[in-house]
Image (cartoon, rainbow, N blue to C red):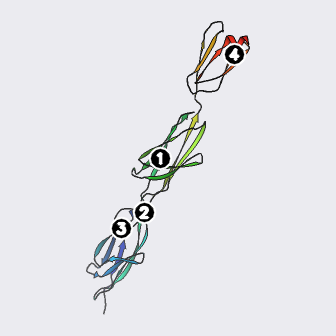
């Protein structure tokens, strides 16, 4: 007995993790009503009996799935098979780093910004090749780095992703510079006898101060950013 041929198609638009997917089945002519089954990666998933068009709901984890719908022939219409691919992908993420240049002795504040803002999890932060583990706990996560010597620092961060969010990375550069300091000199006597008090504008300033009186040189170490030369006693020696 002659049976009417059918044209069967199936499409499954790509979705993101957590979204509900759709398996859209179309059969023509529209008068054909066929019993069918939906298979995902070769395994039976659900009934797919269709007349004209049917939309089946599906949820899956991240991955690529082979979809097939198989329809039996009936008394009047031929059955058939149709195939497609269903993709569940991760949500894209975007990382940015912001860090300002600082002076020696200051702390560097690295602001790590993640989009979408609800991403949480561990990330790897690298500073001039040294790696530390940080935790993204907000849209903007501040990270404080201390005890940095003078120089240029290259910073990078890598978020490996999770079951929902894709990986991302970012990089930045900042410089730690010597601070410029000024000296203030106070002389107790105009004839350069007595005390000469030298003060810097930073109490944490260290190192030697050299005082020259004619051809004589006196050397003292700074303490709390200052030092006091006893000129009279030094010249008598």
| Mark 1 vs mark 4: in front | 4
Quadrant containing the C terminus is top right
Look at mark 1 in the image and give the residue it sits on. 96
Q: Considering only order in the chain, which callout, 2 or 1, is on the residue closer to the N terminus? A: 2
> Residue 27's x, y, as percent?
31, 77
**Mark number, residue 212:** 4
**Mark number, residue 86:** none
Q: Considering only order in the chain, which callout, 4 or 2, is on the residue closer to the N terminus? A: 2
Q: Considering only order in the chain, which callout, 2 or 3, is on the residue closer to the N terminus? A: 3
What residue appears at the point 38 percent right and 80 percent down from the top-left corner? 81
Q: Give the CA distance from mark 1 to mark 2.
A: 22 Å
> Residue 182's x, y, as percent?
58, 22
Question: Residue 234 sits in which quadrant?
Answer: top right
| Mark 3 vs mark 4: in front | 4
- Near mark 4 (Cα within 10 A), the count class, few <14, some 14-19 or many ≥20, is few
Q: Secondary structure at mark 4?
A: strand
Relative to 133, residue 205 above or below: above
Q: Secondary structure at mark 1?
A: strand
Q: Give the CA distance from mark 1 to mark 3.
A: 32 Å
Q: Give the CA distance from mark 3 to mark 2.
A: 12 Å
Q: Considering only order in the chain, which callout, 3 or 1, is on the residue closer to the N terminus? A: 3
- Near mark 1 (Cα within 10 A), the count class, few <14, some 14-19 or many ≥20, is some
What residue appears at the point 40 percent right and 77 percent down from the top-left corner? 43
**Residue sitting farthest toward the bottom:** 1
> Residue 109's x, y, as percent?
49, 39
Look at mark 3 in the image and give the residue it sits on. 59
> Residue 141's x, y, as percent?
45, 45
Q: Considering only order in the chain, which callout, 4 or 3, is on the residue closer to the N terminus? A: 3
Q: Nearer the viewer, residue 223 or 125?
A: 223
Look at mark 2 in the image and give the residue it sits on. 89
- Near mark 2 (Cα within 10 A), the count class, few <14, some 14-19 or many ≥20, is many
Question: Residue 218 sits in which quadrant?
Answer: top right
């Amino acid at each position: 007995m002659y049976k009417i041929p059918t044209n069967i198609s199936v499409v499954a638009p790509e979705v993101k993790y957590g979204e509900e997917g759709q398996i859209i089945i179309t059969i023509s002519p529209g008068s054909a009503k066929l019993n069918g089954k939906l298979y995902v990666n070769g395994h039976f998933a659900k009934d797919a009996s269709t007349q004209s068009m049917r939309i089946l709901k599906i949820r899956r984890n991240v991955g690529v799935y082979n979809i097939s719908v198989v329809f039996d022939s009936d008394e009047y219409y031929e059955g058939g098979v149709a195939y497609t691919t269903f993709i569940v992908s991760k949500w894209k993420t975007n990382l940015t780093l912001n860090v300002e240049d600082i002076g020696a002795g200051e702390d560097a504040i690295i602001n790590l910004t993640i989009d979408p803002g609800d991403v949480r999890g561990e990330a790897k932060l690298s500073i001039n090749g040294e790696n530390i583990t940080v935790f993204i706990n907000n849209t903007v996560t501040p990270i404080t780095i201390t005890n940095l010597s003078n120089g240029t620092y290259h910073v990078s961060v890598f978020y490996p992703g999770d079951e929902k969010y894709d990986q991302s990375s970012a990089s930045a550069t900042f410089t730690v510079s010597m601070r410029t300091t000024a000296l203030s000199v106070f002389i107790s006597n105009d004839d350069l006898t007595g005390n000469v008090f030298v003060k810097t504008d930073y109490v944490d300033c260290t190192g030697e101060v050299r005082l020259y009186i004619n051809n004589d040189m006196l050397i003292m170490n700074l303490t709390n950013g200052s030092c006091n030369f006893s000129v009279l006693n030094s010249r008598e020696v």
